Image (tube, grey):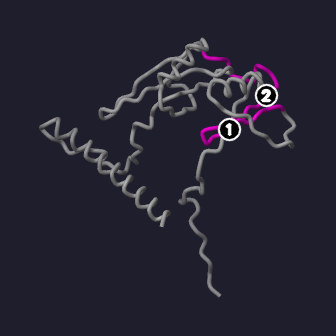
Amino acid sequence: MGIVQKENIVNSPLPLFSLNHVSFLCKSVTETAKFYQEVLGFVLIKRPSSFDFEGAWLFNYGIGIHLLQCNSVNDVRKKPPFINPKDNHISFQCTDVEVVKKKLEEMGMEYVTTVVEDGGIEVDQLFFHDPDGYMIEICNCHKLPVLPISACPLKVPHSNERNQDMSMKTLCSAKMESWMMENLVNDTIDIAI
């Protein structure tokens, strides 16, 4: 008989694999559910019958939104007086921000836009509130490569030429993106075989 050593769970990442849902407290579940259906294209889905409180579950784009009826309107945060892109929010990627702008304008909804630029790539962001004052962002963030911070040196070696400094940063990003794509292709081929 041997001694079984316990794994060091403290230093191990949690066995997570995706975001399941976000949950919002609402003044009116009916009104908020209608908003998420009509504006963002979510679909009502069945929720467990054991719940003893009013609510609604919606689903689309691989994520759920759970709406919970508040006990008192004082339980729900007040709608902010202005749209602040730095406020807490959920974000959805889209293929055409202009189409979203047009739809929001047709619905008479107020929104704010910003543009984020990184390495010559521009990302359009559009922010607005749901009926309960929760912020929603629509963006084309898929334009930005997803690169782990550890993939590139934090300090780029000093250079007398500014262009050389920029090319080193770009090269690092390009190498990482190429490596990630190569691994994705190899994994896809492995699965197909």
Q: Which of marks 1 and 2 precedes in the sequence?
A: 1
> Is 166 placed left or right of 11 in the picture?
left
The residue type indicated by label 2 comes to Gln
Front position among marks 2 and 1? 1
Please state the horizontal and vertical placement of residue 89, each as a whole percent of the image. Answer: 57, 29
Q: Is residue 47 above or below residue 139?
A: below
Residue drawn at point x = 65 percent, y = 37 percent: 22
Of the 4 image quadrants, the one containing the N terminus is bottom right
- The numbered dot on residue 69 is 2
Q: Is residue 61 magenta?
A: yes
Residue position marked by numbered label 1 in the rendering = 59
Q: Which residue is most to the front? A: 193
> Is 166 placed left or right of 65 in the picture?
left
Instruction: Characterize the local packing of mark 1: few (<14), some (14-19) or many (20 or more) Cα atoms within 10 angstroms.
Output: some
> Is 45 placed left or right of 153 in the picture?
right
Residue drawn at point x = 58 percent, y = 68 percent: 7
Residue drawn at point x = 79 percent, y = 40 percent: 47
The residue type indicated by label 1 comes to Phe
Q: Is residue 52 magenta?
A: no
In the foreground, 190 or 86: 190
Q: Which residue is most to the bottom? A: 1
Residue drawn at point x = 61 percent, y = 45 percent: 19
Q: Is residue 181 above or below residue 3?
A: above
**At numbered mark 1, what does the secondary structure look like: helix, strand or loop?**
strand
Disc 2/disc 1 C-alpha distance (Å): 18 Å
Instruction: Characterize the local packing of mark 2: few (<14), some (14-19) or many (20 or more) Cα atoms within 10 angstroms.
Output: many
Q: Which residues are magenta?
A: 54-80
